Amino acid sequence: MNTNNQMESYLATLRLQLAPLTLSEREEIVMEIVAHVRDSAEQSGASVEAVLTRLGPAEALASQYRDGLLIRRASRSFSPIVLLRATMRLATRSVAWIFVFFLGVFGYSFGAGFVIIAFAKMIVPSHAGAWVQNGRMIGFGAFEYGMPSSAHEVLGLWIIPLGLTAGSLTLLLTTFLIRNSLRVSRLAQSRL
Amino acid sequence: MSKSTLNDQDPAQPDRWEAQLRKGAVEMAALASLWQRRLYGLEIIRYLETHSQLALAEGTIYPVLNRLKVEGLLTSEWVEAEAGHPRKYYSLTEAGRERLRVMAEAWTSFANGLSRLLEPVLNEKEKVQ
């Protein structure tokens, strides 16, 4: 490959990998990298190839830009997908984030579960509820098959407001927890 | 955040620990390089090489500068150069100056404290030699 092709393919990869950024952010980064390669090659007398090698792979460079963006966006977002994605990426770096990730998955599933039970009670009332047999709770939730006839359902329609409240509280708490962790990590990043 | 990196290595090979240490200092170093005047990316890299032993992988500095700019600690402007292409110059904002002052104080008191702690270690080394 000649020098121009090498440069073009490096920049093409960089643009592709920076796709989550806005067009103007992306082009500004590309312009800065182009200026760097030219200046560095001219000032040190090194080849473009050598300068690109010193810069490191375009993928790695782009991923450093994307990290900052991901955390920044996620700490403002309320979407479980955006929040979990950011957490998952950070979990590859540190144990504390693996913990936050699992707590997030757990919290979202539990919250969603409560809400689903409340809706199941509205749609198929006989299959959702809290069943007690001989003084022990043997089932809480929505079940495909009925419970043994000796068990009786204790909550009745109360499970609807209960499920909705517990569900939204769990979802809110999980969101708050992840956003807060991301904030703290952003501060730590910028203050180091 | 990266406690685990300290454990999975040969104690006589502090390379990774040193790398972490340098990485932690990059932002402060980048801010410090701009204390007197505006510089563009490559100048910052060269400045850090000559004024400290902080030799960075060249790709490291640009995402860091980008982040510092988003945080409002730096501003940037494109300046047309004789080289025939524009260069992106960075300068400290007032918030950046203030942050750097705070960092410099914290860093210095931290380093002084640790130096006292390490004195016996280094003295012993001299005696052995």
Image (cartoon, coloured by chain):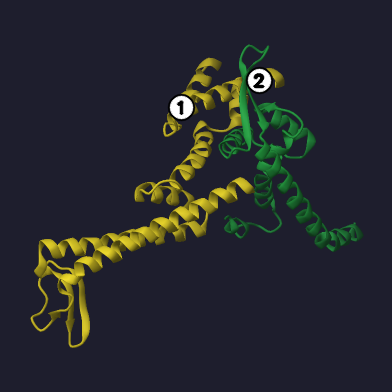
Q: Which disc is residue B1 wearing?
A: none
Tell if the residue under mark 2 belongs to the same chain as the one under mark 1.
yes
Q: Which disc is residue A39 wearing?
A: 2
Residue A165 image point, x, y percent? 28, 64
Position of A49 with respect to B111 (left or right) is left
Task: Give me the residue at 78% from left, 33% from top.
Answer: B50
Residue B97 image point, x, y percent? 70, 39
Q: Chain of mark 2?
A: A
Residue A131 image point, x, y percent? 17, 78
Front residue (pair A147, B68): B68
The local crowd at label 2, few if under 14, some if 14 to 19, many if 20 or more residues have their Cα within 10 Å, is: some
Q: What chain is the green one?
A: B
Q: Amino acid at mark 2?
A: Asp
Q: Which disc is residue A15 wearing?
A: 1
Looking at the rendering, which quadrant does residue A117 occupy?
bottom left
Task: Give me the residue at 45% from left, 53% from top.
Answer: A179
Residue A51 image point, x, y percent? 62, 25
Pointer 2 or 1: first along the chain: 1
Task: Give me the residue at 66% from left, 14% from top.
Answer: B81
Q: CA distance from mark 2 to mark 1?
A: 21 Å
**Which structural element holds mark 1?**
helix
Q: Chain of mark 1?
A: A
Residue B109 seen by the camera: yes
Position of B97 with respect to B125 (left or right) is left
Residue A92 seen by the camera: no
Q: What chain is the yellow one?
A: A
Q: Amino acid at mark 1?
A: Arg
